[in-house]
């Protein structure tokens, strides 16, 4: 009988994990909330053997803890839990020791997770490993922000210390002039917010996705982000392509993984300066990357490899992959365009140019984040749901 795995959190890239594990011979149970069951799309994948409905991880964390532990005790055949997103990764660090004996969580150990998710500690580890990184400082008030930017100089950036949050509804705020700084200080949240300030590095983002065991990388894949869902390039990737591993990036990842004795899947990101070619550490994510689709499409089945690492199954990972293969996330692209229009960041000409790029990239992409011909139903549900919500809004506006 195939091993059974519980997958937590329903994102677009959860589909890639489901397909990967199912094709590798694992029987997948998907955790869903009531809202995700009613209006979501991930759970309809043909690779989902069963679903488990649970309280929301964010809105009812105590209820989720109790429900998960109870579910695993009542279903002793499930010996493996695979958290996809940061919410479930953070949650499992706190309750890992309370899970039934023999249950394996497919993520790095708690110490490595906490070191990676703390932006200040992650930067300190990069420094210990002699990995170049932008000058970084934690701030928690408008005054600290102002003083730090004045010290660092322009251009700088500010972003939330917790990557699940936003600052003024953005993942990253650019501070390139005195006017930008004064505007950010004036709009600083009244309740305060822990953020980090860094020197801005201009360049392309590189995603280095890997699986390691005891600090040794056993599978590695690199891609270059070409466009994001923000005009300033600070958002989530909507179009990226596979590239040959940059030796220095791999070396940096090896140093970092060795320092943490890292075991499991991870996404390490670097910014490569367009002028000098110098690369700078951006962040380390102890989880499956949102852009994992292109890696799996290229034969680098990182989710399945990660599970095999944790449960001790035989591993024969691919070590090479085709280059210049691209992936498109059309839904994220269109939602990004919509946000830019609503914020008045994109005028008519920019909006039309964005829409043209979105359609062009959709047509020329080698694969797509949600859609495959062998499992089309989730994408159909996704766009049908968007259509219904749009129609409902129009009806309410009359």
Image (tube, grey):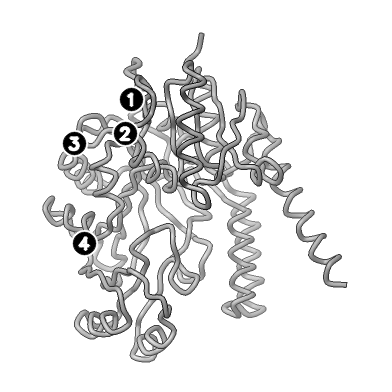
Q: Secondary structure at mark 3?
A: loop
Which of the two discs, 4 and 1, sits closer to the camera?
1
> What whole-number distance in Å separates the C-alpha atoms at marks 3 and 4?
21 Å
Q: Is residue 324 in sight in this rendering?
A: no
Residue 161: quarter of image: bottom left
In the image, residue 151 sits, relative to residue 339, either above or below, namely: below
Whether label 3 touches label 4, CB < 8 Å: no
Q: Residue at x 35, y 19 (%)?
A: 102
> What whole-number distance in Å separates the C-alpha atoms at marks 4 and 1?
31 Å
In the image, residue 270 sits, relative to residue 337, either above or below, namely: above
Circle on res. 95: none
In the rendered image, which residue does mark 1 sit on?
Answer: 310
Q: Earlier in the sequence, mark 4 or mark 1?
A: 4
How crowded pointer 4 is (Cα within 10 Å; few <14, some 14-19, many 20+) is rated as: many
Q: Secondary structure at mark 2?
A: strand
In the rendered image, which residue does mark 2 sit on?
Answer: 264
Residue 93 picture location, percent across and down: 33, 41
In the rendered image, which residue does mark 3 sit on?
Answer: 261
Whether label 2 touches label 1, CB < 8 Å: yes
Q: Is residue 352 in sight in this rendering?
A: yes
How crowded pointer 2 is (Cα within 10 Å; few <14, some 14-19, many 20+) is rated as: many
Residue 112 picture location, percent across and down: 24, 42
> What whole-number distance in Å separates the C-alpha atoms at marks 4 and 2?
24 Å
Residue 151 picture location, percent across and down: 19, 83
Q: Earlier in the sequence, mark 2 or mark 1?
A: 2
> What whole-number distance in Å separates the C-alpha atoms at marks 2 and 1?
7 Å
In the image, residue 258 sits, relative to residue 174, either above or below, namely: above
Q: Which residue is the extreme one toward the right?
A: 398
In the rendered image, which residue does mark 4 sit on?
Answer: 133
């Amino acid at each position: 009988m195939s091993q059974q795995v519980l997958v937590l959190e329903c994102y677009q890239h959860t589909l890639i994990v489901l397909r990967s594990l199912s094709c590798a011979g694992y029987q997948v149970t998907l955790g869903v909330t009531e809202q995700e069951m009613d209006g979501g799309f991930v759970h309809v994948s043909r690779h989902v053997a069963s679903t488990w409905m649970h309280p929301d991880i964010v809105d009812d964390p105590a209820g989720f803890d109790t429900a998960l532990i109870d579910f695993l005790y009542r279903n002793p055949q499930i010996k493996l839990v695979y958290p996809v997103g940061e919410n479930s990764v953070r949650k499992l660090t706190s309750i890992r020791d309370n899970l039934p004996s023999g249950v394996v969580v497919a993520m790095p150990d708690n110490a490595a997770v906490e070191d990676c998710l703390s932006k200040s500690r992650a930067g300190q580890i990069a420094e210990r490993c002699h990995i170049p990184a932008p000058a970084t400082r934690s701030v928690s008030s408008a005054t600290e922000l102002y003083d730090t930017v004045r010290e660092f100089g322009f251009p700088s950036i500010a972003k939330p210390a917790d990557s699940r949050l936003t600052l003024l509804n953005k993942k990253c705020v650019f501070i390139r002039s005195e006017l930008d700084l004064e505007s950010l200080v004036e709009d600083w949240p009244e309740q305060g917010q822990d953020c980090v300030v860094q020197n801005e590095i201009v360049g392309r983002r590189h995603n280095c996705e890997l699986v390691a065991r005891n600090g040794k990388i056993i599978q590695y894949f690199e891609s270059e982000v070409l466009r994001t869902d923000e005009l300033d390039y600070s958002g989530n990737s909507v179009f990226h392509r596979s590239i040959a591993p940059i030796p220095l990036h791999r070396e940096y990842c090896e140093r970092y993984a060795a320092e943490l004795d890292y075991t499991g899947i991870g996404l390490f990101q670097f910014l490569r300066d367009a002028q000098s070619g110098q690369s700078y550490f951006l962040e380390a994510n102890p989880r499956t990357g949102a852009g994992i689709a292109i890696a799996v499409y290229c034969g680098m089945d990182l989710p399945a490899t990660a599970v095999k690492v944790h449960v001790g199954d035989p591993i024969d990972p691919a070590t090479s992959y085709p280059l210049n293969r691209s992936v498109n996330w059309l839904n994220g692209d269109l939602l990004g365009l919509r946000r830019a229009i609503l914020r008045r960041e994109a005028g008519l000409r920019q909006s039309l140019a964005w829409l043209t790029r979105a359609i062009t990239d959709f047509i020329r992409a080698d694969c797509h984040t949600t859609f495959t011909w062998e499992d089309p139903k989730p994408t159909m549900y996704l766009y049908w749901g968007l259509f219904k919500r749009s129609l409902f809004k129009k009806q309410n506006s009359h």
